[in-house]
Image (tube, rainbow, N blue to C red):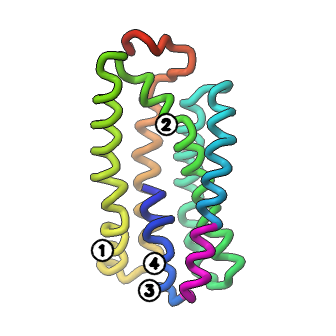
Amino acid sequence: MCTYVLLVYGPTFLTTELKVPAAQAKLAGFAAMVVMMVLTVVFARLCDRAGRKPFLIAGAIWVLVTAPLGFLLLHRLSFGFLVAGLPLVVIGEALMLAPQPAIFAGLFPTARRYSGVGIGYNIGVVLLGGAGPLVATAIVQATQSTYAPAGYLACGALISLIAAICTPETLRRDRTSTAS
């Protein structure tokens, strides 16, 4: 959800709703993507040692707390705040993205892993992620508030936090047999 709302819809939101010059909006989006790429790799290496579940929980909490702060920074309308606002929230996304492939694979028995991960992940992306720009736009129009997407991200983070708490740790599991 963060990817689609912040990195896909974010530059459009900045230019259409906050009237930020297109070049600055694109650079802010690019800075957030770089932060996400680097931190996802760093966090993935760390979660292979420390466990996956703590990273999912920390990422959800991070987005829950920083979504409103990130949007406050974006509304400051200076380039420095734009470059800080999007990456601030994206740190939480990187925390959640890093363990996802390993934790998702560990949730399914080997014989059903490909289908389980493929179907489960893609249904979530279609319903929550891919619809993110559409939902964020509709929320802004319905509420007449350019802060509304922060609430949408926070709700998604809360759902992610609940799911992360309920998800079993897969770090020390045998990945060649069934998940229990």
Residue behind mark 2: 100
Q: Are marks 3 and 1 in contact (CB under 8 Å)?
A: no
Q: Position of residue 37 (x, y in %)?
A: 62, 52
Q: Nearer the viewer, residue 137 or 11?
A: 11
Q: Quadrant of the N terminus?
A: bottom left
Q: Using a 10 Å C-alpha cutoff, classify the residue at mark 2 as few (fewer than 14 neighbours), some (14 to 19) or many (20 or more).
A: some
Measure how far apart labels 2 and 3 are at the Cα level: 33 Å
Give the dominant element type of the magenta stretch: helix, strand or loop: helix
Q: Residue at x 63, y 27 (%)?
A: 48
Q: Which of the marked residues, 4 or 2, is nearer the chain's N terminus?
A: 4
Q: Using the image, determine if residue 78 lies above or below residue 110.
A: below
Measure how far apart labels 4 and 2 are at the Cα level: 27 Å
**Badge nearest the viewer, 1 or 4:** 4
Q: Are marks 2 and 3 in contact (CB under 8 Å)?
A: no
Q: Are marks 4 and 2 in contact (CB under 8 Å)?
A: no
Q: Position of residue 131 (x, y in %)?
A: 31, 61
Q: Is residue 68 magenta?
A: no
For the residue labelled by badge 3, is the local secondary structure a helix, a strand or a loop? helix
